[in-house]
Image (cartoon, rainbow, N blue to C red):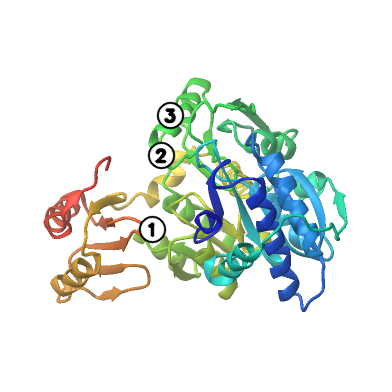
């Protein structure tokens, strides 16, 4: 049963079946055992924090009990957003890792654990999570003596200082509309941004409840509607919608139009590359061509990544990049342990906007050059076969075909388009993202690709 709760990047499942306090204890014991092994057998300290879900307090308590039984000391940071942990691990002396109790944007009956190692490096299936799973599955009894010490610590003042270090003093008054989605931004936003000079915040869904006003996933268009409506109703300069654990932030302009995260990445490039000229900027391979073009124009080094936060963080660290952006709404920062932060992304957007007398819609407009398909899912049984056939069909016109993540076929210079097709790990689906130099070209590409890919999946 416990094997079902381990995923590629974290531990996550419904509460109380299959993920309950007994399983949480075993995850804690296994995590503590793994960290000590990685630490040369020395115990060290593991940090624990939790989100707002009804099951989070008892699950964090069970996790802590398992960690302490393994021999490590624990510092309980209390209720915090996920990015708080990425700040805290390097900040707390002697910390060898940390665990955030959260299920991100999943339904409220879910719970889980995001595990990070020294320096806030993510622990995924290929970097220790499988080993933690094996240890957890081997634990026969949770009736074991407590060994490690427990301390509670409040780091909010230090965290506020850290996040606001990414905010340049606002040169003009800004009014922003924020939807916390009844998630951890409910605590994060007032703790960090209240009292910032020249910043007025209008809030929505800033209450912890057992029933959310809507799903805390800003990637789903309907969940952005309260933000879009609020921005126009209040005459705000921009809108922000945070996901459940507040490590992601989606932005709208002053007209309520959702800003694509690749376009936002391009906008922020100048801001960050001024801090570290010539640096690499990491972006996921589904991003608009304008991101790569912008990085080059600004003298930076484009670093194209596989999809997923573990991959983005690893490449940013490997290239010593200053900044990275992903279509999912995750933004990554060198001076935040190469990790993602919704709060820092929000601070960076405010900084850029306040430097200009233009509205954000005008700042983002130059980057909206090329029509995009968005992600379209196709039902495909023979995923490998279809992707091989695509490579053969477009080989003559492509200046680039690679398999970094699925297959990317780039005919931008020769035919004016590129596309990526990735296979779902869990379903018989292929995911298409395409872009072209104009709408007619994109329409023609999709008409050619659709019969090759099969049936569009329901709901897409």
Marks 3 and 1, how far apart at CA: 23 Å
Marks 1 and 2, how far apart at CA: 18 Å
Where is residue 232 drawn, in percent x and y?
46, 24
Where is residue 412 drawn, in percent x and y?
24, 66
* Element carrying mark 1: loop
Sequence-earlier tag: 3 or 2: 2
Q: Which residue is mark 2?
A: 220
Marks 3 and 2, how far apart at CA: 10 Å
Question: Which class describes the residues within 10 Å of circle 1: few (<14), some (14-19), or many (20+)?
Answer: many
Residue at image coords 71%, 33%:
190
Q: Is residue 259 above or below residue 401?
A: above
Q: Between residues 386 and 32, which one lies in front from this camera angle?
A: 32
Where is residue 220 drawn, in percent x and y?
41, 39
Which dot, 3 or 2, sits closer to the camera? 2
Q: Quadrant of residue 90?
A: bottom right
Q: Which residue is mark 3?
A: 225
Which dot, 3 or 1, sits closer to the camera? 3
Q: Residue furthest top?
A: 233
């Amino acid at each position: 049963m416990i094997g079902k709760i381990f995923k590629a990047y974290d531990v996550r499942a419904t509460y109380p079946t299959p993920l309950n306090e007994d399983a949480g204890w075993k995850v804690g014991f296994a995590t503590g055992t793994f960290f000590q092994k990685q630490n040369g057998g020395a115990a060290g300290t593991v940090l624990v924090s939790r989100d707002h879900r009804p099951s989070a307090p008892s699950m964090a308590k069970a996790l802590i009990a398992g960690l302490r039984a393994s021999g490590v000391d624990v510092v309980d940071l209390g209720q915090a957003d996920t990015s708080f942990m990425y700040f805290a691990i390097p900040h707390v002396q002697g910390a060898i890792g940390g665990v955030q109790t959260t299920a991100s944007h999943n339904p409220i009956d879910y719970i889980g654990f995001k595990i990070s190692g020294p320096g806030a490096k993510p622990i995924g299936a290929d970097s220790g999570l499988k080993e933690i799973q094996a240890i957890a599955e081997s634990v026969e009894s949770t009736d074991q003596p407590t060994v490690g010490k427990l301390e509670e610590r409040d780091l909010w003042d230090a965290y506020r200082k850290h996040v606001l270090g990414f905010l340049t003093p606002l040169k003009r008054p800004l009014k922003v509309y924020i939807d916390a989605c009844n998630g951890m931004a409910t605590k994060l936003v007032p703790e960090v941004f209240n009292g910032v000079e020249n910043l007025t915040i209008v809030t929505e869904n800033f209450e912890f409840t057992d029933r959310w006003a809507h799903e805390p996933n800003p990637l789903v268009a309907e969940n952005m509607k309260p933000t879009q409506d609020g921005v126009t109703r209040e005459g705000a300069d921009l809108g922000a919608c945070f996901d459940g654990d507040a490590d992601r932030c989606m932005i709208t302009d002053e007209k309520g139009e959702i800003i694509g995260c690749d376009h936002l990445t391009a906008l922020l490039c100048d801001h960050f590359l001024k801090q570290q000229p010539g640096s690499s900027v990491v972006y996921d391979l589904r991003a608009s061509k304008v991101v790569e073009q912008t990085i080059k124009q600004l003298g930076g080094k484009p670093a194209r990544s596989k999809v997923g936060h573990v991959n983005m963080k690893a490449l940013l660290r490997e290239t010593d990049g200053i900044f990275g952006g992903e279509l999912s709404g995750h933004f990554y920062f060198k001076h935040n342990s190469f990790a993602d932060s919704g709060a820092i992304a929000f601070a960076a957007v405010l900084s850029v906007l306040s430097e200009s007398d233009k509205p954000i819609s005008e700042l983002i407009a130059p980057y909206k050059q090329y029509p995009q398909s968005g992600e379209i899912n196709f039902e495909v049984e023979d995923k490998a076969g279809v992707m091989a056939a695509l490579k053969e069909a477009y080989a003559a016109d492509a200046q680039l075909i690679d398999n970094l993540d699925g297959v990317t076929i780039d005919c931008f210079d020769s035919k004016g388009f590129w596309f990526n097709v990735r296979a779902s790990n869990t379903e018989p689906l292929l995911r298409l993202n395409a872009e072209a130099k104009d709408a007619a070209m994109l329409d023609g590409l999709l008409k050619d690709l659709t019969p090759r890919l099969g049936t569009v999946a329901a709901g897409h």
